[in-house]
Structures are given as structure tokens and as C-alpha cells.
Image: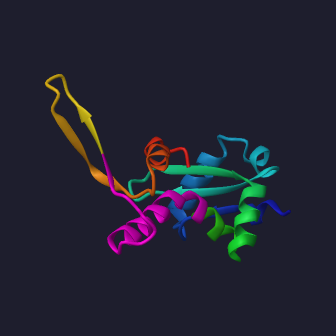
Amino acid sequence: MDYKKKVFVNKDLSDVEIAFVKSMLDEIDLKQYLKTCFVYIDLCESGSLEIISIVDEHVLDISKQYDLPHKMAMEYIRNKTEIDQNLNMLLYWNGLNNMKKYVAYNKNEDNEKHYAHVSIYPDNKGEAYITLAGKD
């Protein structure tokens, strides 16, 4: 596969952004990753750069399963937890599929609970642990 078809960027880049991304990519051996992976470059609003590589088979499977272009398959894989949580939240608030709402908390020395500002919507505790641990 042509390596140019395996690299995706989250937005259209200005000339300055292109120079920045190119300088960052020159510091890594991108060809090594492109042999077995697709690469997604996310230039954040804060000016930081995130480079994500995902194994070819995973991207190709998602692309085929959902009939998506490779870039959209990469974006789906990257945002899967958020997509799943939004769907589960919708199901929860509509009383469908036995979804539950969990809010993580910590206890301090005085045994007071401090709740997180984010809720998660799994259908069981096991899935809640996995989601909170980020092992999707």
C-alpha cells in the first residue's frame, strides 16, 4: 500500500502548520510505523501535536465492518470510548438496554467523598472499571 494513503491529519493545515508537522515527523522514523500501521496526526488547538499509529488490520477491519474510508475508521477507533459513552448515556436517559450511571469518587483522610465531574454509562460494573481505566 502507498504510504501516502496511510497518513491522515485531523484538519487542513496552513503553511506554518505544515512546516511544524514536517519538522516533528523528521524526528521519528515514520516509515517504520507505516510498514504495519496507519498513522493519524492530530494538531490540537493548543498547538500540541499528537501522532497515533494503529495496526493495519484493526483499521481495515473497522473500515470494512462499517463501510468507512480509512481516515474515518481511524477517527472512530480514536474516539470509540467517547462515542460509546454518548450512545450509552442516550440509552440510559431513555430507559433502554439496562444502562447504569456511575460517578467515580475518591475519599480523603477524613473519609469524605469527592465526586468526579464526569459520569460514565456502562451496563455493568466490569465495563465501568474498564472504561475508567481507559482499557478500551
The main secondary structure of the magenta stretch is helix
Q: Quick check: 22 left or right of 85? A: right
* Farthest residue, direction right: 1
* Nearer to the camera, 86 or 51: 86
Report if residue 100 lies within the magenta region. yes
Image quadrant occupied by the N terminus: bottom right
Where residue 64 appears, x then y in whole percent?
Answer: 75, 71
Q: How many marks?
A: 0
Q: How is the structure coloured here?
A: rainbow
Question: Which residue is found at the position 38% from the left and 66% from the top?
Answer: 89
Q: Quick check: 106 left or right of 15? A: left
- Compared with residue 134, is residue 63 higher up or lower down, i.e. above or below? below
The magenta stretch spans which residues? 76-103
Q: Quick check: 89 left or right of 22? A: left
- Compared with residue 99, is residue 109 higher up or lower down, i.e. above or below? above
* Farthest residue, direction top: 109
Question: Which residue is found at the position 46% from the left and 60% from the top?
Answer: 82
Where residue 48 appears, x then y in whole percent?
Answer: 45, 50
- Compared with residue 49, is residue 74 higher up or lower down, i.e. above or below? below
Report if residue 135 lies within the magenta region. no
* Nearer to the camera, 5 or 113: 113
